[in-house]
Amino acid sequence: MARTPPLPDLRPARINALGEFAASIAHEVKQPLAAITLNAQAGLHWLEQDPPRLEQARVALRVVLQASRAATGMVRSLHGMTCQAEPERSTFFVDDMLRDVLQLLRGELRQHEIRVSEEFGLARHQLYADQVQLMQVIMNLLQNGIDALHAVHGRERTLALRSMLMEDALHISVTDNGAGIAPELAERIFDPLFSTKPGGTGMGLTICHNIVQAHGGRLWATTAQPHGTVFHLSFKEYTLWTPSRS
Ligand SMILES: Nc1ncnc2c1ncn2[C@@H]1O[C@H](COP(=O)(O)OP(=O)(O)OP(=O)(O)O)[C@@H](O)[C@H]1O
Ligand SMILES: [Mg+2]
């Protein structure tokens, strides 16, 4: 009697895809949720002063609102990516977007005693891109920098966020002065689910890579001197804003 060949077992692939999606969601909401918790605590702290420090409380609550909008946007955009939807593009100023991301991470940077240097050189340059997704990329790179600095003791912990025009492309870089990436691991850091951190999902750089690729950009890492890592982003398509003369 002829036997039908066994059906291929698709479960591992599906479980893996589902695992990656769940890990991506968990990964992307973690940062805004941390910002919400930190800033809600700060807001309460300012309100409990005698007299209450209303301006500081207002600033903290604005960050809470900004972070909860970011979380909503990121879940929407991840859903879009999973359904292979096109990025939702708009035109925005690169440096303003970088400032917004830093604002969300301020509390965490202060908590870990990290000095941040900002060198923004793209005041008039705009990207036509999915702003929420680009924010995710910068946030993930900064978060990896913060993670890398946890283990740094005995020297100042620093992160640098830079933007500039280089060889006719928009260039953004994130530099930390952590321990760097071991050469034997360098090939694997963009792989899904690859992580050297306890509790890491290993999805941060995969998400970054997918977003940058969908925008026709490049993302790569180099070694920083004397310590640490630089992540570079570059985009060839941009617009230069000129004020109208009306
Ligand atoms: N700035 C960095 N310095 C040193 N190692 C890094 C840095 N950024 C990434 N890596 C390495 O790349 C790996 C993958 O990073 P990725 O962001 O994809 O996941 P993760 O950070 O481990 O997990 P999660 O993003 O969920 O916290 C990290 O586990 C780490 O080994
Ligand atoms: Mg990460």
Image (spheres, helix red, strand yellow):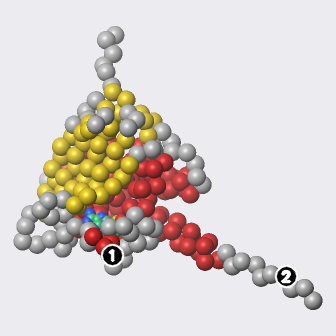
Q: Residues within 10 Å of mark 1 (few under 14, many from 20)?
A: few
Residue at the outermost top position: 246
**In terms of secondary structure, where does tag 1 sit?**
loop
How much space separates mark 1 and mark 2, taking CA atoms? 44 Å
Instruction: Specify the quadrant of the image occupied by residue 30.
Output: bottom left
The residue positioned 25% from the left and 42% from the top of the image is: 163
Identify residue for label 2: 4
Q: Is residue 152 above or below residue 176?
A: below
| Residue type, mark 2 in image | Thr
Q: Is residue 190 left or right of residue 224?
A: right
Q: Is residue 68 above or below residue 169?
A: below
The residue positioned 28% from the left and 29% from the top of the image is: 124
Identify residue for label 1: 196
List x then y, in percent, for residue 108. 23, 62
Instruction: Specify the quadrant of the image occupied by residue 33.
Output: bottom left
> Would you say residue 168 is visible in this rendering?
yes
Frontmost residue, 110 versus 78:
78
List x then y, in percent, for residue 86. 55, 45
List x then y, in percent, for residue 195. 37, 73
The residue positioned 33% from the left and 55% from the top of the image is: 220
Residue at the outermost bottom position: 1
